[in-house]
Image: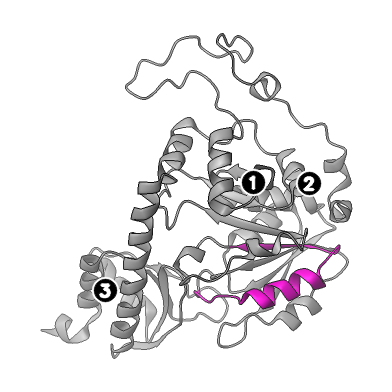
Amino acid sequence: MKLLERARPEILALQPYSSARMESGVAATMLNANESPWPASCTAPALNRYPDPQPAPLRAALAGFYAVAPGNILIGRGSDEAIDLLVRAFCRPGYDAITIASPTFGMYAVAARVQGADVTEVPLTPGFVLDAKALLAAVTPDTKLVFVCSPNNPTGGLVPLPMLAHLAQALRDRAVLVVDEAYIEFADGAASAMTLLDRHDNVAVLRTLSKAHALAGARVGVLIAAAPLVALVRRIQAPYPLPMPSVDAALSALSVSALAATDQRVTAICRERERMARALAGLAEVLAVFDSAANFLCVRFVDARKAWRRLAASGIVVRDVSRYPQLADCLRITIGTPEENAALLGALDARKAAA
């Protein structure tokens, strides 16, 4: 895989840490990892053994769900871990860089700056559309990773698959195109960038069970990429990234009945998203409600801080994203239950507040 030549030489030469579980798997008597031979005195399932670093049942379930081979899957602690691992694997401190289209998810820049890598920011258009030409123009020989969030957080915009395919082709053997699809389930059946993997070995897709699958507390994220890229990143992953309760929760969430319930939740959230967009747009203090393919709305207010305080006084917390480029006076509002959404609208309605 030619793209691996762009990875850090010291990572390619690294002898990765080999945990006891990696070396021997599971046996009837486990005496190789300095574990307690007895379960803890608590009501939780037996947790005295270290978990499988990449549990085969979960890896197989995720591979089946995403229609890829198990070798294309790396499971980690949310998408955040995959972002950090990719940056550490490819970016040498003080030399290399990532490119992002801002405003976007803040962890891409945080991971790069912690690593000592430069961050090149390319503004989205005034309508929060990705400018592919400008993005590619910003890529230099030092650029190792290009992050695209689709649907984008915090604006909610979706990047069309043909544009992603164009970026992947233009970046071939130059940089990894990392497509973060944390919210893709809410995008009305939009095609995933995973469909590009067969033709573009420089594409890496981030997925998560935190959003649509309602497992934010379990912290289960997935990196889907060419097998050599997955193997490279696994070299520097922590020995035991997945707690066993999280693995059990993820397997349960991928059952037939759970997936059916997930589909119902996603449908309800999308329906509420459209209703909330119309209702918010009708409020006097709202200047704009931006199109969203995610489970949230980005809303521009006359005075975002005033609106935020009014909601907080009613016990409702939303995200103030005014600090992001181009998002002055904007709040990001997650779509809740119909009852929660009604309470939010009631708290924002100036006429009701004055009554």
Question: Which color scheme is applied?
Answer: one colour
Which range is magenta?
155-180
Q: Is residue 4 above or below residue 56?
A: below
Q: Secondary structure at mark 2?
A: helix
Q: Position of residue 135 (x, y in %)?
A: 74, 77
Question: Which image quadrant: the C terminus?
Answer: bottom left
Which residue appears at 56% of the width and 55% of the height? 207
Is 71 a magenta residue? no
Q: Position of residue 174 (x, y in %)?
A: 85, 64
Disc on res. 228: 2
Q: Is residue 125 above or below residue 203?
A: below
Which residue appears at 22% of the width and 82% of the height? 349
Q: Which residue is mark 3?
A: 310
Q: Secondary structure at mark 3?
A: helix
User: What's the CA distance linking mark 3 and mark 1?
Assistant: 44 Å
Taking depth in this image into account, of 352 and 143 the one nearest to the observer is 143
Q: Is residue 29 above or below residue 124?
A: above
Residue lying furthest left in this view?
355
Q: Amino acid at mark 1?
A: Ile
Mark 2, other Cα within 10 Å: few <14 / some 14–19 / many ≥20 = some
Is 173 a magenta residue? yes
In terms of image quadrants, where is residue 319?
bottom left
In terms of image quadrants, where is residue 288?
bottom left
Q: Is residue 68 above or below residue 187?
A: above
User: What's the CA distance linking mark 3 and mark 2?
Assistant: 51 Å
Q: Which residue is mark 1?
A: 73
Q: Amino acid at mark 3?
A: Arg
For the residues carrying marks 3 and 1, which lies nearer the camera in this image? Answer: 1
Q: Secondary structure at mark 1?
A: strand
Q: Amino acid at mark 2?
A: Pro
Question: In terms of sequence position, does the residue under pointer 1 or pointer 2 come before the other?
Answer: 1
One can see residue 55 in this view: no
